[in-house]
Image: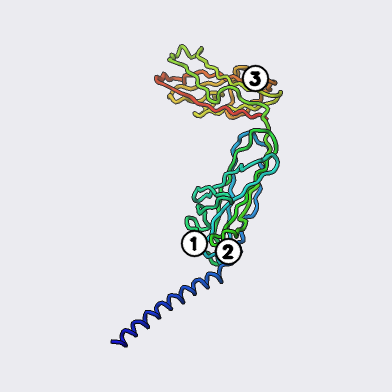
Amino acid sequence: MRDLTMGKFIWIIKIKRCLFIVFCSVASQYAMSADPILNLTCSNPKMYLYLKEVSPLSHFQTRLAGTCKVNSFIAWGGYYTQTQEGKGNTTGRDLTVVAAVTGYPVPYESAPSDTNCFGPGNCDAYLNAGETFPYDFIISGTTKSTPGLYAPAVTLYGTDKAFPGNKVVIGSVIVTYNVVQPACSMSSASHLSLGFGALTSNDFASSQQVAEISLNCSAATQVNVTLVPTQSAVNGSPGVSATTLDGLSMAATWVDSTSAVVFNTPRNFAMNKGSNLIQLGFRPKLNAGSSPVGDFSSQYTLNIVYP
């Protein structure tokens, strides 16, 4: 009985020592393998986006994507953060940065989080030396409303989760643009609706409706105006396009010259300083041999290109 008891006691001691040895072995391996300096080589370290001259409050977007190679073992994985700065008239955090895969915003360096990881959805994933992992970020913003030169910039970092003080630059994007005030601006509504009411074939000759587009220009300038029909154009009939009612078409003319509009072809207008008016006339037209009955509609897009 005494020998059995002693045997049990010795067996328990051996198990405890074994656990202690295994624990020490893991801790020792981690301490020896984890490089205290995060070491990555990334493929796209710096990118420039030149927008040149842009209108106020214009949206822009670009992507920063590539791969990073792991040069030393990363024990607990890592996550991304960002910082922003600006040159010229840029004053604050002008850019929005999200991970393309998850749609999560990349946190600022002052508020790190595990929302964006080297391994998507798993910031705890270790990485061995020689492995690679992809990165893909969408960088977007809106140009300022005040004319001037702007140059917002964002730098993206990779941070070691085991050693949060250790970080490395993944890449950076510098956006440069010059906000200029357009010479002209449209003072009328961007969507116009013309109603014809109830019509008979006897009314078509006098049923023209006129669309008026007002432009206010800061100086005399030239603009190009193009009318694009949504319905198909009628071959051999300049300015005539189909409507949604079979057998009925719509004829478009320039009111100032009474000439038929040439679809998809720019017409030049000389704009004066101040208020200007562009007028387009629309008149229903029966197709030969047709007597359609029912509702109809016809849609167009008017493109005005000005400095």
| Residue 145 rendering spot, x and y as whole percentages | 64, 33
Q: Which residue is label 2 attached to?
A: 70
Residue 276 got which mark?
3
| Residue that appears at 65% across and 44% down | 152
Which of the image's four quarters has the N terminus? bottom left
Q: Which amino acid does label 3 sit on?
A: Asn
Q: Decide: is 285 above or below 154.
A: above
Quarter of the figure with residue 166? bottom right
Instruction: Give the farthest residue toward the left.
Output: 1
Q: Which of 186 and 24 is in front in this view?
A: 24
Amino acid type, mark 2:
Val
Nearest the eye: 156 or 22? 22
Q: Residue 125 carries which label?
A: 1
Q: Disc 1 residue type? A: Ala
Q: Which of marks 2 and 1 precedes in the sequence?
A: 2
Secondary structure type for disc 3: strand
Q: Where is residue 10 drawn, in percent x and y?
A: 37, 83
Residue 17 is labelled as: none
